[in-house]
Amino acid sequence: AAQIEVMDIGGNKDFPVQETISALTRERRKWNLRRDQWLTKSGISDRIYYWSAAAIASRLSFYDEVGRRGYDAAVFAGGQLFMDWLSLGVCELLKRFEKASVPVFFNACGVGSSFSKQIRECLARQLNSENIKLVSTRDDADTIEKRYFCGRKCVTPTYDPALWTKETYGQEHKECSVVGLGVMYSNHAGQHRITKFWLDVIRNLDRRNIEWKMFCNGSLEDYEYGCHVLKKAGRNPEGSILKCTASPRELTAQIAGFRSIISFRLHSHIIAGSLGIPGIAVVWDDKLRFFYSHLGHPERCATIEVSGKQIMSMLERAEAEGVNSEMIEKQKKYAKKILLDSINQVIGYEQR
C-alpha cells in the first residue's frame, strides 16, 4: 500500500485562528486590494507580486525541507491553485520537486484571478517542466491551457475530489425542513446589493413559512457579514446563523442538516451534492456554473440580480427534481481513474 503524507502548501499544521476585525479595517483592506489589482493590471506596479513574494519568503525553509524528503510522487489535490494568491507557493514547491526529479500531478485544480504577469510567468515556467505529468481541472481547461501552456501541454477535464465528502467523513443527509443560506463576504460585488438580495430571499422564505438558517464556510468575515444581514432583517443573529465552523468535518455536518441550500461558495454546493442535497448557486465566479453544468443543471445558477420570488421558484424546482446521485457516482469514479491511471503510468502504482 502507498504511504501518503498530507501537507498544506503554506506549511500550516492546523487551521489558523481567525481574528475579529472592525468593519472599517475590512473595508480598508478591500480598498487596498482593489488598488493593488488596478496597479498590477495597468502595468504601473506589480504590487500583488511583491506582497505575495514577501509572504513566501517566510516559508522558504519549509519548502526546502519538503524538497529534501525524497518523495516518489507529489499530488496537488484540488483547490483553486491557478491564481495569484497561491501560485508563488506552488512555484516554490515545484522548483524543489523538479530539482529532486519528483513526478508531479495536479488533480482537479481550479483556475482563479491572475493579475500579476510575474506570478503567471513563474508558474508557467514550472508547469512546463518535464516532471509535470498531469494537469487536470474541475472547471476551465481552456483558460489554464491559454494562460500557462500556449499549446505545449493539454489540460485534462475532470471532477472535484470533494464529491467524496460523504465517504470521507462518514456523514449522511439528515431529513429536515430547514433551508440553508450560505453567506459570503465578497470583494466582487457591492455589499449593499448583496445585502438587498439576501433580505429579499429572507422575506420570501418567511412569506412561505419556510424554516431557514444561515451558515458560512468557516470564514470569520463571512460569519460577521451574515450577522450584519440578520440585523438588517430585524433578526437576532443568535439562533439564526450557525456557528462559524473550524474544520471541513464540522461544515459537512452542518450542511447535512439542511433540506436544500441557497449559497455563494462552491464547496458548500459540492458537499451538498455529495450528500444528495439540492441547491441554488448564487454566481460570483464561473466555477459555480461549471459545477452545475457537470451535474446537468445549469439552470440552478442565479445572480444577485435575481429576485427572491424567482429564487423560490428555482429552489422549488430543484427540490422536486433532487440530485442525480448516479451521475455523481460516475463522476467520482471517472476522476479517480484519471488520477490513478496517470500515477500508474509514471511510477507503476497498482490500482486496487
Image (cartoon, rainbow, N blue to C red):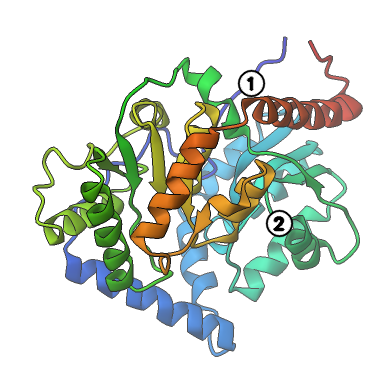
Residue at 83% x, 19% y is 349
Please indicate, yes or no, whether residue 90 appears anywhere in the rendered image: no
Tell me if residue 254 comes above or below residue 94 in the rendering.
above
**Which residue in the protein does label 1 denote?**
4
Q: Quadrant of the N terminus?
A: top right
Nearest to N terminus: mark 1 or mark 2: 1
Are the residues at dot 1 and dot 2 in contact (C-beta closer than 8 Å)? no
Which of the pair 75/298 is nearer the observer?
298
Q: Percent x, y for residue 340?
A: 79, 25
Residue at 33% x, 66% y is 194
Please indicate, yes or no, whether residue 311 appears anywhere in the rendered image: yes
Tell me if residue 302 comes above or below residue 274 in the rendering.
below
From the viewer's perspective, is 133 left or right of 46?
Answer: right
Name which quarter of the figure residue 242 lies in: top left
Q: Percent x, y for residue 91?
A: 66, 54
Badge 1 element: loop
Q: Percent x, y for residue 263?
A: 41, 49
Q: Name the residue type under label 1.
A: Ile
Which of the pair 176/67 is nearer the observer?
176
Q: Name the residue type under label 2.
A: Asp
From the viewer's perspective, is 61 left or right of 203?
Answer: right
Q: Quadrant of the C terminus?
A: top right
**Which residue in the protein does label 2 denote?**
140
Residue at mark 1 to residue at mark 2: CA–CA distance: 28 Å
Q: Percent x, y for residue 176?
A: 32, 25
Query: Mark 2 Cα within 10 Å, few/some/many (few <14, many 20+)?
Result: some
Name which quarter of the figure residue 196 lies in: bottom left
